[in-house]
Amino acid sequence: MKKLRFTPLLFRRVHKWAGLVIGIQFILWAVSGTAMALLDSAEVAGRAAPSPQVIGNAAETLLPPARLGIGTGTDALQLRMLAGKAVYEVRSKGSVRLLDAATGADVTVNAILARSVARTANGSEITSVTRMAEPNLESRDFSGPVWRVNFSDEVNSSVYISAITGELLVSRGDTWRIWDFFWMLHNMDYAERASFNHPLIIAAGFGVLFVSTTGFYLLFKSFRRREFRWVPFMKDDRKRIVTR
């Protein structure tokens, strides 16, 4: 069996093929980084969530919390506006319940209510309303079931609303989708597009370190001493042959 020798030729061959793979990823990093920098940051962020609606004088006609019949096991109680209606948000043992603040009746976040909430963020025509059991890539920063409301505006906006609390979570458009594609290429997280601490990008990092290290090694091995004769302390002191 031939013994493996760590020679400059071996390093050169490994460096060449590793450099090809890493070089492709370098191009993807450069292209994706440039593309993300050129996109309008305001459009990438999406349209701002609607301003909180003030309850105002309507509070005088609302039921006091003591008359809601929610018991003593409540962890949190919040009075807020939801699609123009005052509601109590009751949190107890990890669950959330919405009550009509005027009547005490349960409020369900259905498709009709999701449409009303979505219109507070986008006045364009609604094309579809879909309930999702869990968030997709566009709403991956949140958890729980959501309503997706699509609009027919120029950027094909989609608004995501919590199916539990009725809150408007986020708005996405085509600019954000383009940015997200390049973000996926940049951080190499092709599944969830959220993490920098996954094995693939760590391997790429070590690959870059290997290519740069072997590159420096091969760089110095490619020079000869005679090429540095112009440097005073690198002169070639050859032995003179003395003939008698």
Image (tube, rainbow, N blue to C red):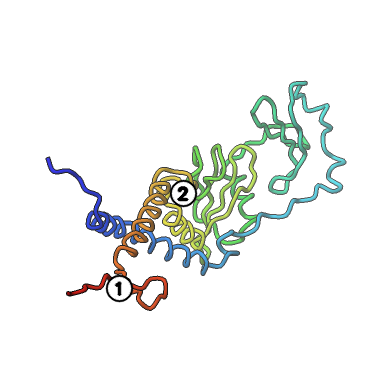
Q: At label 2, which amino acid type do we have?
A: Arg
* Front-lying residue, 206 or 244: 244
Q: Where does the image place residue 27, in percent across and percent down from the top left? A: 38, 64
* Residue that sits furthest to the front in the current view: 244
Q: Where does the image place residue 202, in percent across and percent down from the top left? A: 42, 46
**Is 215 displayed left or right of 170 in the figure?**
left
Q: Where does the image place residue 74, in percent across and percent down from the top left? A: 74, 25
Mark 2 residue element: loop
| Residue 17 vertical placement versus 140 (above, below) | below
Q: At label 1, which amino acid type do we have?
A: Arg
Residue at point 67%, 31% (across, down): 97
| Residue 98 vertical placement versus 177 (above, below) | above
Reading the chain from its start, which is encountered first: label 1 or label 2? Answer: 2
Name the mark nearer the viewer: 1 or 2.
Answer: 1
Dot 1 crowding, Cα within 10 Å, few <14, some 14–19, many 20+: few
* Residue that sits furthest to the left in the current view: 1
Find residue 193 and name its label. Answer: 2
Q: Residue 235 falls in which quadrant of the image?
A: bottom left
User: Residue under circle 1?
Assistant: 226
Q: Where does the image place residue 75, in percent across and percent down from the top left? A: 74, 27
Q: Quadrant of the N terminus?
A: top left
Residue at point 37%, 61% (across, down): 216
* Front-lying residue, 20 or 194: 20
**Is 137 displayed left or right of 235 in the figure?**
right
